[in-house]
Image (cartoon, rainbow, N blue to C red):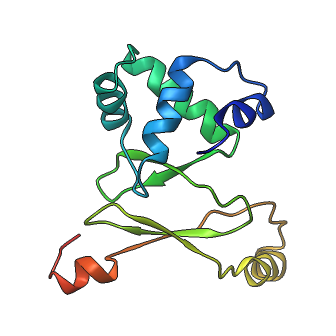
Amino acid sequence: MQDFEGLLRGLKLKVTPRRRAILEVMAAGSTFLSPEEIWKKVGEAGTNVGLPTVYRILEELAGGGVVTRVLHDNRQLYYYLCPNKGHHHHFVCLSCHKVEDVDLCLGEALEQEVKLRIQGALFSHILQLQGLCRECREKGGKA
């Protein structure tokens, strides 16, 4: 069981039933979810929350680094509750929506490229890898 109260307090957010319910739904799986999917699941679990509130809470949590925004080829924004707090990237399966950590980071090489070729300064980067996981590939899945 995750410490959602401590997590929310660490972000200086009030611990509310709606925030807890959203975090519980997201923690139940290792896949990314759309705000609409989260809204439906939270409602099915018995918490009354409006869809605009779900969007607002997700953006608060993403701004605090608690959830990760997942960009999909369909141009819809999804969210993933990532328990790994260290610097890493994600592999996203476009078929089953599973998200897995990728610990390899090319940040130093990217920083050097920006510094030398563009003569700029790199402050952060986001890398998201998309494809099919092993299980979906073996099933002949499609993105």
Tell me the residue at 34%/19% (across/down). Answer: 46
Tell me the residue at 16%/81% (across/down). Answer: 139
- Quadrant in which the C terminus is drawn: bottom left
The outermost residue toward the left is 140
Residue 120 vertical position relative to residue 1 in the rendered view, above or below: below
- The spot of residue 38 in percent (x, y) is 37, 35
In terms of image quadrants, where is residue 16?
top right
Tell me the residue at 29%/29% (across/down). Answer: 40
- State the residue in front, 94 or 29: 29
Relative placement, left or right, of 98 versus 74 is right
- The spot of residue 4 in percent (x, y) is 64, 35
Relative placement, left or right, of 91 versus 105 is left
Relative placement, left or right, of 112 versus 21 is right
Residue 1 vertical position relative to residue 46 in the rendered view, above or below: below
- The spot of residue 76 in percent (x, y) is 35, 46
- The spot of residue 91 in percent (x, y) is 47, 71
Tell me the residue at 24%/77% (across/down). Answer: 136
Residue 31 vertical position relative to residue 77 in the rendered view, above or below: below
- State the residue in front, 105 or 61: 61
- State the residue in front, 17 or 115: 17
Relative placement, left or right, of 97 versus 122 is left
- Quadrant in which the N terminus is drawn: top right
